[in-house]
Image (cartoon, rainbow, N blue to C red):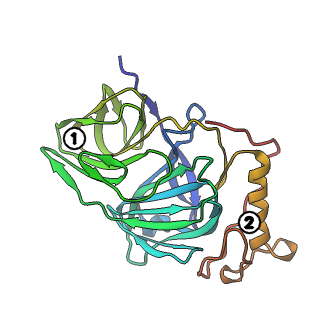
Amino acid sequence: MTDVEVLAPREVPLGGPRAMRVRRTLPQRQRSLIGAWCFVDHYGPDDVDETGGMVLPAHPHTGLQTASWLFGGELEHRDSVGSLATVRPGELNLMTAGRGISHTEVSTPGTTMLHGAQLWIALPDGSRHVEPRFEHFAPVPVRGPGWEARVFIGSLLGASSPVEVHTPLLGAEIMLAPGRSFEVEVDPTFEHGVLLDVGSVDVDGQELAPSDLGHVPAGRSTITLTAAEEARVLLLGGPPFGESIVMWWNFIGRSHDEVAGYRQAWQDQVVVGDGVVADGRDVAPGRFGVVDLDLQPIPAPPLPNVRLKQRG
């Protein structure tokens, strides 16, 4: 009997001119976080000629970090602290929103196929108002018989990432050869999530389908991954977060009123008279800064008719 919980994906539109669709496994009604990981989107492989690729104009964030990880294709990232970077397969782009940031992500012109994961990390109360920043890291792969791993956050398998996180955390890509069973030593104080990208994998006796996220509770010192065919997974982990959050649209706060205030601050920057959205470079300065790009920013959707509730 396994205690691995399977979180199946649901398909949601991400945006863009032809509404690129992604498969979301976190948050869900029964589980909002795995450690500080609070959001997991999996997408592709998508033919950019058919989907239009990723075109995310300027939009805001607070109280979180975004971790962009690609398996195929390239994205251009721009943000309001002046960062301009290309997201490539096997390389981490980590953006800390802190008190407030805005950014864009757009497929590069040469990208014909897009395939990756977008991950969010909730910042704890003591760090959620830090100054926004951006980091890039290309982990060196570590290898063993029938496996290869890239550790992009935290430490695993003798490899460590230098990027700054604000709670203990793990993020790694693991490739498994067909028929390989791999016992991974992990921190027993962490709970873990295993996202299956491609192939077939069994996690401690629980089979996952592609895009499933398997939750492994804290208390394990090892996790066994068994691949019936060549497989690639993301292994995410951290100690239970221990705080309740309010997450709505692109904001993380601690109360309805706080999130509503973030929404209004963004609207004040991007919406001019009579509800007209400003052009990209005409956005007013404010909490979220301005991204140096012509794309018209995304205005915030209306708040729901009920008060936002904490979860965690």
Residue drawn at x 70%, y 45% is: 254
Q: What residue type is labelled 1?
A: Glu
Closest to the camera, between mark 1 and mark 2, is: 2
Badge 1 element: strand
**Real-space Cα distance between discs 1 and 2?**
47 Å
**Position in image of residue 168 (x %, y %):** 44, 44
Camera-nearest residue between 298 and 216: 216
Q: In this view, does 285 lie to the left or right of 194?
A: right
| Quadrant including the N terminus | top left
Which residue bears the numbered disc 2?
A: 266
Image quarter where the C terminus lies is: top right
- Is residue 45 in view from this perspective? no
For residue 229, the mark is 1
Lateral position of residue 198 relative to residue 80, left or right: left
- How crowded pointer 1 is (Cα within 10 Å; few <14, some 14-19, many 20+) is rated as some
**Tag 2, which secondary structure?**
helix
Q: Which comes sooner in the sequence, label 1 or label 2?
A: 1
**Residue 82 position within the rendered picture, expressed as x and y whole percent measured from the top left:** 54, 78
Left of 162 or right of it: where is 300? right
Q: Nearer the viewer, residue 72 or 286?
A: 286
Whether residue 87 appears in this view of the structure is yes
The reply to whether dot 1 and dot 2 touch (C-beta < 8 Å) is no
Q: Is residue 48 above or below residue 110?
A: above
| Number of numbered callouts drawn | 2
